[in-house]
Image: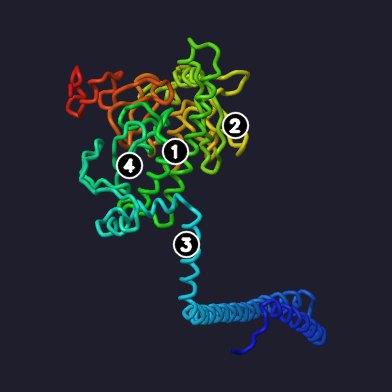
Amino acid sequence: MDAQPWPGYAWHVLEHFAALARLQLLRLLQRWDLPQRAHVQLLQHIGVVGVIVLSGWAGYVSVRAIWELTELIIYITVRCVVNLRYLIQPAMPWLLVAAASMYLRCLLDSAALRQEWLEFLQQWGWSRQLLSAFGLRVARGQAVDCPICTETFEDNPWTMATLSCCKQSVCWACLCRHAESVIDDARPDMNCPLFCKVLIPDVMVYKSFRRHQWSWRGLDLLGQKTRRKCRAYERWCLSSGLANTCAARMEDVSSQTDGIPTVVHCPGSDCDHMWLLPKQLRRSKASQEPGSCWDPRSWSFGRHMGFYVAPSEGGEDLRCVHCPSCEVAYCLLCSQPWEVSGHHHAGKSCLEFDATLPSTLRSKERHWAGAKECPGCGVRTLRSMGCNHMTCTQCAMHWCWVCGRPWQPWHYGCTANSQGSADCSLM
């Protein structure tokens, strides 16, 4: 490989030769005794041609030097990869032995991991016989039905979970879905899915996430989704604990329905800050917002005509909240940033402000696609799974997902065909 000068060095050489050429040309013009004006014009033309030629040469040298430097980097990278392969291949058995030894050490130190392997090996008859030969207690492996999804499973600890409250057995998939629905709906308690109103232990919630991680439907080898679920559960526990603690400390028991605070999370993706806000205060602000795009209060014309006036005090919009952690202003009701791409939320209703945003930034509309409004306060709710019984996280109203009326026990039988009827069908 020929050694080439560095591009910076080429520019210094060009400057040197350009100065020498200019000096020689001035001496030649003085000998010819040409007019001063002709000197200037001739120097300008020669200078333009010289700059073009020299720039082309400098560009060629620079491109060639960069290309050869790239070839050298690629050559070194390929050689390193090839040599690394020849180094790792003989050491691969030792690396596998080291990894197996590290995992065996973790297995000996963790009782929960040993219990998980013990439950995993109870899925097959030959493994149950092997465990029985070592004197371990194993499941009988009888066929049972899950009372939630009504599917038939083999009764073993890997597929069925035994609830400590009612001693009933449900499949781990249904327990995982129940925990996810409680977290997504921001319900106050993680109660038993069989309506015995007893809290589910944290160990069973985490175990249901692990079962879903190693199932065929939710296989997650790296555990990224499972870690996100665990973080969401921890965040839900913190917010639920804060709300319950504040509700228990209230002195006026008669006003607990309206005075129980709600935990507001910062809508920032990388911010975990949260604060408490009375539900009555949030409901009073939400009651002034238009609930439909057909409402004149959600139009810019209607706002200028005085149909809509944003709640304000001292010249500041009361809907605007500032997160002390990420120092970003958000709207308390729609959770949109207070200023997006030059558009301000001040004085505008949430629907009007959302309509002014570009289509790529209207994440709220895409997120709430298919959602329904609470008949009590109008907040939109999205149901991913579960029954028709909905509990609003803002006004705590119980309502039916299908017909949108206040909840009654017979609404469990509501179907899409009975939505338009006067009375909901009975089960």
| Label 4 or label 1, whichever comes before in sequence order | 4
Q: In which image quadrant can residue 362 be found?
A: top left
Question: Tag 4's secondary structure?
Answer: strand
| Label 2 or label 1, whichever comes before in sequence order | 1
Whether residues under marks 3 and 4 lie with C-beta atoms below 8 angstroms apart, the answer is no
Q: Quadrant of the image for the C terminus?
A: top left
| Label 3 or label 4, whichever comes before in sequence order | 3
Q: Amino acid at mark 3?
A: Leu
Alpha carbon separation for disc pair 2 and 1: 33 Å
Q: Amino acid at mark 4?
A: Ala
Q: In which image quadrant can residue 216 be found?
A: bottom left
Alpha carbon separation for disc pair 2 and 4: 44 Å
Mark 4 Cα-neighbour bin, 10 Å: few <14, some 14–19, many ≥20: many
Question: Tag 2's secondary structure?
Answer: strand
Q: Amino acid at mark 2?
A: His
Residue holding disc 4:
161
Q: Residue furthest bottom?
A: 2
Q: Quadrant of the image for the N terminus?
A: bottom right
**Relative image position of residue 17 (x, y in whole percent):** 74, 83
| Label 1 or label 3, whichever comes before in sequence order | 3
Whether residues under marks 2 and 4 lie with C-beta atoms below 8 angstroms apart, the answer is no
Q: What number is the disc on residue 104?
A: 3
Residue holding disc 2:
322
| Label 2 or label 4, whichever comes before in sequence order | 4
